[in-house]
Amino acid sequence: MVITVKCSAAQWSLLDPAEGVAEAFNTGAAAFDAAVGRASAHHRRTGQGAIVRVEALGNSVDAVHFEALAIASGPVIGLNPAPVA
């Protein structure tokens, strides 16, 4: 999932593909904080990767990455639990 924080004509907005509509913010900082919170929540809820992208002045940068969680496909072997005292 890519959540985009965008500045267009001095107006900051957050574009969340899950919501489908742009949400306006007074500042870029407020939009960015909201985007990071949503990306983090999506990552925690689904285990999937999420990116916060910032677009301004005709440029863009992927500012925050939450990597997808790797799931082991088989049993974990070779672990030795610590002895109980």
Image: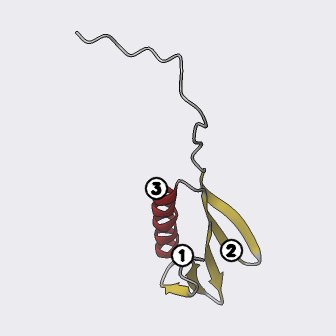
Residue ID at (52%, 69%) = 35
Residue 67: where, in percent of width, then height? 60, 50
Residue ID at (46%, 59%) = 45
CA gap, disc 1 and disc 2: 10 Å
CA gap, disc 3 and disc 2: 25 Å
Location of mark 3 (residue): 44
Could you say whether the residue bearing mark 1 is in a helix, strand or loop?
Answer: helix
Residue 26: where, in percent of width, then height? 48, 84
- Looking at the image, which is closer to me, 82 or 77? 77
Location of mark 1 (residue): 28
Give me the disc on residue 55. Answer: 2
CA gap, disc 1 and disc 3: 24 Å
Q: Residues within 10 Å of mark 3 (few under 14, many from 20)?
A: some
Q: Is residue 34 above or below residue 13?
A: above
Q: Is residue 16 above or below residue 9?
A: above
Amino acid on which the number 2 mark rests in the picture = Glu
Residue 60 placement, left or right of 13 = right
Quadrant in the picture for the N terminus = bottom right
Could you say whether the residue bearing mark 3 is in a helix, strand or loop?
Answer: helix
